Every structure is written in C-alpha cells, then in structure tokens.
Image (tube, rainbow, N blue to C red):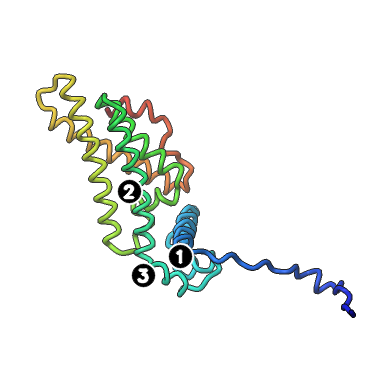
Amino acid sequence: MHTSPPDTSDSAAAKPAELPRKRLKPGERRVQILQTLASMLEQPGAERVTTAALAARLEVSEAALYRHFASKAQMFEGLIEFIETSIFSLLNQIAERETDGLAQAQRIVAVLLQFGERNPGMARVMVGDALVYENERLVARMNQFFDKVESSLRQALRTAAEASGSSTPTVEAQAQASVLVSFIIGRLQRYARSGFKRLPTEQLDAAMRMLA
C-alpha cells in the first residue's frame, strides 16, 4: 500500500498539530469564567473589566459568556457569593472554637484581612473599587456583607465587655465593632489602591492592641 512521505517543509514544522480543546461542563465553565474575572481584577490599575476583554482572555465569544451568566452583574454576584461563603464559614468556625470574646474579634479581623491579601481581585470587589461602574445592587450587597461582619464583631465584643465588668457593654461593643470594620475596609482599600503593595496584615498585632 502506497503511503505519502511525511511533510518536512518549514511550514509544517512551524505549525504543530493542534490538540483538541477539552469541552468543559457548564458548571466547570462557570467556575473558569469567575476565576478568570478574579484574576483580571488582580491587575494593578485595571479599572473596568469588559465582557469583551473577559471573552478574549478565555478565547470564547461574548455570547458564550452569556450562556452561563445572564449579565456581567451576575458574574460579579458569583464572586460576591464566593466571598460570603468563604468568610462566613470561617467566622462560624471562630465562634465555635474561640470562647474569649476579644480573641474572637481579633480573629475575625485577621481572617478578613488575610482573605483579601490572598485574593487581591476579591479585595477590590470587597471594597467596591471593582464595582464602581457596575450595578448598584452589587455595592448594596457588599455593604450588607460588612454589616454582617460588624454584627459578628459586635456580638464578640459585647461578650468581652461583659466579662470585663463594663457597665455599658452594648454601647462599648457597638463603638468598637464600627471602628474595626472601618479599619478592615481601610486596610483593604489601601492594599487595592497601592497596586497590592501595602499588605493589609502588616503590623496587624500592634494595630489590634491599639484598636481592641
């Protein structure tokens, strides 16, 4: 049987055979889209991620994105859901394992700042920098997130105030919780706006001794 000799031309050598692209399942593609969006938000100076840029990074069409998400706002909601699930599961663990109220509050602050430090793109979502040009309900949802964090801090700090014999534990806890949430947001904002150079956890122990 006659067979043709292999093509050894330069053009053939310059074009290696393309491997077939793995077809992702719908759930896997959704995760890939969110991971790519988060990674694009990690680029210092990135103001707004467009669906066109996101599709180009993924090497798919914009229409392909909308088969998995109804809108770009829904993509950001996916990131916010990841933040909420990750943080609140950790806060529940802290509440279960740590009985000292002050230590509980300090751990809550550390968890928020460590999460932002390890996930720079998420930090930009948390402080709203990545949401400036997006749907207003996303900003409202992140505000609710920090309201819940403040509530957790308030509960822990009330326990600490009661244990120390404070005559106004509720008032004291409210004031301290408000200050700590402002500290968390401020540290994360500085991190995002410094191009992720100023780490939110720097000198954290010293700062916590002053704040709580």
Residue at left offset 14%, top offset 19%: 165
Which residue bears the numbered disc 2?
84
Q: Position of residue 134 (x, y in %)?
A: 34, 63
Would you name the residue on which mark 3 appears?
Answer: 70
Residue mark closest to the camera, 3 vs 1 = 1
Mark carried by residue 26: 1
Above or below, 71 against 31 in this view is: below
User: Is 177 above or below relative to 209?
Assistant: below
Sort mark 3 into few (<14), some (14-19) or many (20+) by Cα contacts within 10 Å.
Answer: few
In the image, taking residue 206 as reference, residue 16 lies left or right, namely right
Q: Secondary structure at mark 1?
A: helix
Query: Which numbered disc, 1 or 2, marks the residue closer to the eye?
Result: 1
Query: Which residue is at 18% across, 32% downward?
Result: 173
Q: Which amino acid, by three-letter code, is at mark 1?
A: Pro
Q: Nearer the viewer, residue 146 or 25?
A: 25
Total labels drawn: 3
Q: Amino acid at mark 2?
A: Glu
Q: Earlier in the sequence, mark 3 or mark 2?
A: 3
Question: Relative to 6, is 87 on the left or the right?
Answer: left
Mark 1 and mark 2 lie on one chain; the one further toward the N terminus is 1
Q: The N terminus lies in which quarter of the figure?
A: bottom right
